[in-house]
Image: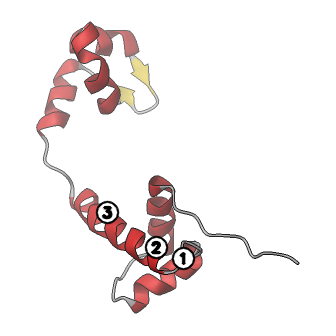
Amino acid sequence: MIAFIDEHRDQFGVEAICRTLGATECGFITSRAYRAAKRRPASARALRDVLLLEELKRIHAENYSVYGVRKMHHAMARAGWQVGRDQIARLMKAAGLQGESPRVC
């Protein structure tokens, strides 16, 4: 939502966009809430995700980009990271990383 407003605010203005959007899946967004969200520092989860994402990309590339979520979870554990399998799945999906299916002869 915030990214959408950032993208179109020069063209329409924040207040007009928030008024037009009205109710959304995550509730109402007002221009005041938008500005508060822009000033809010990044959460601990977001900061850790940035670190983990770089490590995921590195390990995935080192293993010829064939590891899926299960093997990436094991590889991250071997590298000393304590990360849940669901978190790895979420980050891999966000980064567009996926494993290769085994080839059948």
Question: Percent x, y for residue 5?
Answer: 29, 23
**Which residue position holds label 2?**
61
Q: Which residue is pictured at 21% across the width and 61% down the height?
A: 44
Q: Secondary structure at mark 1?
A: loop
Q: Measure the C-alpha gap from mark 1 to mark 2.
A: 5 Å
Query: Does the residue at mark 1 contact the one at mark 2 (Cβ under 8 Å)?
Result: yes
Q: Which residue is pictured at 42% across the width and 78% down the height?
A: 59
Q: Residues within 10 Å of mark 3 (few under 14, many from 20)?
A: some
* Amino acid found under the numbered disc labelled 1: Tyr
Splitting the image into 4 quarters, where does residue 76 fall? bottom left
Query: Between residues 44 and 60, which one lies in front from this camera angle?
Result: 60
Residue 61 in sight in this render: yes
Q: Secondary structure at mark 2?
A: helix
Q: Which residue is pictured at 28% across the width and 61% down the height?
A: 50
* Amino acid found under the numbered disc labelled 3: Asp
Q: Residues within 10 Å of mark 1 (few under 14, many from 20)?
A: few
Task: Tell me, for residue 49, which label it has, or none.
Answer: 3
Q: Is residue 34 left or right of residue 55?
A: left
Instruction: Name the mark nearer the viewer: 3 or 2.
Output: 2
- Residue extending farthest to the bottom is 78
**Which residue position holds label 1?**
64
- Residue extending farthest to the right is 105
The figure's colour scheme reads secondary structure
Q: Residues within 10 Å of mark 2 (few under 14, many from 20)?
A: few
Which sits earlier in the primary sequence, circle 3 or circle 2?
3
Q: Judge whether 45 appears above or below 102 on screen.
A: above
* Amino acid found under the numbered disc labelled 2: Ala
Question: Percent x, y for residue 37?
Answer: 19, 36
